[in-house]
Image (spheres, grey):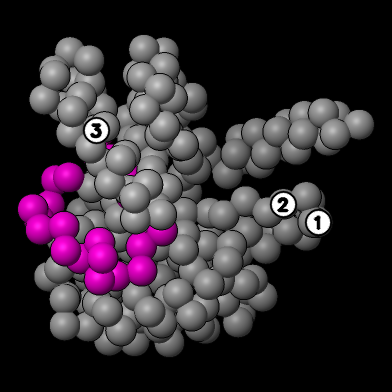
């Protein structure tokens, strides 16, 4: 996970998680900044760089009438393709905009942008939208991961989410992983991906760049 140390041109006292920060304008700035960075990494590493970069899309952004126009302009201006992006959207953001969600999500898929449901399990109880909408990935909320193995009910929920996702041909990401025991359990139940302090804390761009360089060098050496 990477974090941006500078904010959008219009300064605000709002925190990065507040509704004011997550307005359509601030969200556009974040998405454009991420796409600019992807382009810089592509130019630096060439065909070696094929990492999809995940970006949170707030409820306000998702409800923004010109969302698709905004995304199209950013992709055009930065010169990257949609397949380099994965947009993370909460259950609530989708279902609170259910009338337009189907159209928007299909438009995103037409641009080859992958879709991820963030904080899965903390929002609406209905699972019908998983069949209805073109979702690629489920992210299991950290509140479930924190208590796996210590709480039989949470452990069962995590395993059920992984099983459900796989039956629907979706990938699974576990959030908030902090211990080797959690890692081993998630491996055992077939969870493909995880993020959390066990692996790394959020990195500023320069340290993220250094981490990518090390990983690409390692992969290159293994291929020799």
Residue 67, image x, y percentages? 35, 81
**Residue 175, labelled with which disc?**
none
- Which residue occupies the foreground of this view, 122 or 202? 122
Residue 56, image x, y percentages? 36, 57
Examine the structure image and report whether residue 184 is included in the region drawn in magenta.
Answer: no
Q: Which residues are magenta?
A: 121-142
CA gap between label 3 and label 1 equals 38 Å
Mark closer to the observer (3, 1): 3
Residue at the limit of the structure toward the left, as seen here:
125
Residue at the limit of the structure toward the right, as seen here:
224
Name the residue carrying label 1. Answer: 46
- Which residue occupies the foreground of this view, 169 or 171? 169
**Which tag, 3 or 1, sits closer to the chain's start?**
1
Residue 13 left/right relative to 32 = left
Residue at the limit of the structure toward the front, as seen here:
167
Name the residue carrying label 2. Answer: 49
CA gap between label 3 and label 2 equals 32 Å
Instruction: Name the residue rendered at 30%, 40% in the picture.
Output: 163
Name the residue carrying label 3. Answer: 158
Q: Secondary structure at mark 1?
A: helix
């Amino acid at each position: 996970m990477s974090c941006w140390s500078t904010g959008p041109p219009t300064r605000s006292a709002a925190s990065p998680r507040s509704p004011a920060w997550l307005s359509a304008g601030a969200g556009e700035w974040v998405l454009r900044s991420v796409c600019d960075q992807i382009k810089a990494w592509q130019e630096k590493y060439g065909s070696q760089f094929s990492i999809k970069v995940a970006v949170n899309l707030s409820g306000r952004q998702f409800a923004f009438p010109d969302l698709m126009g905004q995304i199209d302009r950013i992709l055009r201006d930065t010169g990257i393709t949609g397949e380099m992006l994965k947009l993370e959207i909460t259950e609530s953001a989708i279902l609170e905009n259910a009338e337009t969600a189907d159209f928007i999500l299909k438009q995103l898929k037409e641009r080859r942008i992958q879709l991820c449901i963030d904080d899965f399990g903390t929002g609406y109880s209905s699972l019908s939208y998983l069949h209805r909408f073109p979702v690629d990935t489920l992210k299991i909320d950290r509140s479930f991961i924190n208590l796996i193995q210590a709480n039989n009910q949470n452990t069962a929920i995590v395993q059920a989410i992984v099983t459900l996702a796989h039956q629907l041909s979706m990938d699974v990401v576990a959030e908030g992983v902090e211990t080797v025991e959690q890692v081993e359990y998630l491996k055992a139940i077939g969870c493909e991906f995880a993020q959390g302090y066990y692996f790394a804390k959020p990195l500023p761009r320069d340290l993220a760049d250094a981490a990518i360089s090390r990983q690409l060098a390692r992969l290159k050496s293994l291929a020799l």
